[in-house]
Image: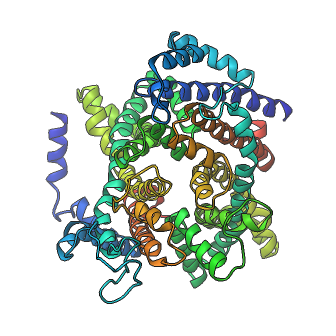
Amino acid sequence: MALYVLKRILLTIPVLFATALLIFFIFQLIPGDVVQASMTQKLMTLEQQNQMREALGLNKPVLERAATYAVALLHGDMGRSFRTGQPVLDLLMSQLPYTLILITASLFVAVLIGIPLGLAAALKRNSAVDSGAMTLAVLGASIPQYWLGLVMILVVAVNLKWLPATGSEGISTLILPALALGIAEMAIIARLTRSEMVEVLQSDYVRTAEAKGLGRRAVVMGHAFRNSLVPIVTMLGLQVGALLGGAVVIEVVFARPGLGTVVVQSILKRDIPVIQGGILLIAAIFVIVNLIVDISYSFLDPRIRTGEGS
Amino acid sequence: MATAELELDGAAPAVEEPEAPIRVFFRRLMRHRSGQVGLIGVLLIFAIALVGPFFLHSSPTAVVVGQKLIGPSFAFPFGTDQLGRDVLTRVVYGAQLSLTLGLVPVIIASCIGVPIGVLVGYAPRVDLILMRVLDVWMAIPALVFALAVIAILGPGLNNVMLALGIAWIPYYTRMARGNVKRAKGNGYVEYAIAAGATDFRIMFVHLLQSVAAPVIVMVTIGIGDAILSGSALSFIGLGAPPPTPEWGAILRDGREFFRIAWWISVFPGLAIVFTVVSFNLLGDALRDTLDPRVRRGG
């Protein structure tokens, strides 16, 4: 067990490292170079440009710079913001908690609404409950999150005055953004829960459990649902990627601080080191979440831990 | 030679003409409830995009003097915006742009991603290295990857479409690879080799056919995703610049005024929901009718 967890953690390190290098090389494709790209914000004389190139080490060959970048990353150095001169890592770390809280709250929305909805649909298959839940799921996956956010601000915050429209203090400012961001994931989880449960409920061991005389509740929750958990948790892990992308937009809609807001502002202001660092940090969160998902399998499904079966 | 004989064998005892697969497919699709709704919705959107502008008497950027921020009325069913432009006109013109925004990224991603996936699935030697590269690529969430591309190319509608297209390549590659690997086990690849087919012919005639159905499903649902992601990028100011009537851009332009003029934001949003729901329903129906593995499912 401990060995399995350790192996998974060690396997993540090269992935993180490769991701950092991929992002580094993508940003080498910038037309001209970083200095020219940042010129749209402030004009520099040729001499100033060359000084900046010298300071950033842009005159060196690309592989050497990649190595320098990798070593610097290991020391927690992502460079400095072109605009403010602040270390990129400090800037990003100050924003990270806001994004993590938003993502976590959205996952709660997805799980707490999506799973019961999917369960209800599966247990009352082909009923009004089923078609109602699945209509909701199709709608949820098709509504633009930012638009849902706008409509909720208009209805709940402006007209009803129940919750604040913007801000980042306290739980009340979190509810609307988490709903706007989580609804799409809720839809996916509801559909998945339904299809998994429909399949599992027809399986032999569920019939056996029923034949043993177990109650409906024990069969559904203890036997059937437990087996649907592995695909649901896998999907949740993968959907964190969509949540991280969606958070960028939702943060802008609700004027919330966070990684997304920083990255979007930096794109508009051509602050390359911050964009590069922000994207790397978001990718790192995604990789780590999926590591946690992988490890959680071994608790949900003992076969994976011992290497039996699949 | 072998194929010719086989065809003759198959044709000779056929007393009843079997129904063409394409007709079977359409019959199944039309019997599928969400397929009907989705197909009608998609056709409607295409119709509006193609002929809608001919029924309107003004351009999407024309300003009606003295008619700023007028609510929905008989003259302006969707109201007017802060500059006095007719929102209905802008939404109808936006249909073309938003459909383009939906189509181009999936065309880019599938035209590059699928052939690579077929190649990798067929030739295991390239497989190991390339799949590791794709794993890393997919470690960056697609929308965030698109942000990186936009950061490099600069904002704009064309760059958004290119960025989303590039970001989605690995998903198509992975899907095509998986299907090719499964199809290789079906025996007809050995048969094609025995019949003397070249590698190229096996990959791009036989195996490409085996991935056609899942690609069609993925592309259909992908169009909806592209419209959602692309309009979101316009909304946060990285896509279509003003006064482009792309739906996400209309929403962004109306955002400042939405507390006093809800119609500027609500109607383009409903247009997006309608379009994406249609493509998603059609995609679901296509999956049920095209993919034999899920046809039995609930």
Residue B109 coordinates in the image, percent (x, y): 38, 42
In-image side of B37 versus A161 (left or right): left
Instruction: Please name the residue shown 33% across and 59% down the image.
Output: B244
In-image side of A185 versus A101 (left or right): left
A137 or A57: nearer the eye?
A57
Instruction: Please name the residue shown 65% across and 34% down the image.
Output: A84
Residue A248 at least partly seen: yes
Instruction: Please name the residue shown 41% across and 24% down the image.
Output: A32
Residue A158 coordinates in the image, percent (x, y): 63, 77
In-image side of A103 versus A22 (left or right): right
A305 or B238: nearer the eye?
B238
Query: On the image, which quarter does residue B39 sit in?
Result: bottom left
Residue A152 coordinates in the image, percent (x, y): 60, 73
Residue A196 at least partly seen: no
Instruction: Please name the residue shown 54% across and 12% down the image.
Output: A63
From the image, which quarter does the N terminus of chain B lie in? top left
Which color scheme is applied?
A: rainbow
Query: On the image, which quarter does residue A75 sit in?
Result: top right
Work out whether A294 lies above or below A105.
above
Work out whether A94 lies above or below A55.
below
A98 or A199: nearer the eye?
A98
Farthest right residue in view: A2
A120 or B190: nearer the eye?
A120
The image shows a total of numbered marks equal to 0
Residue B7 coordinates in the image, percent (x, y): 17, 45
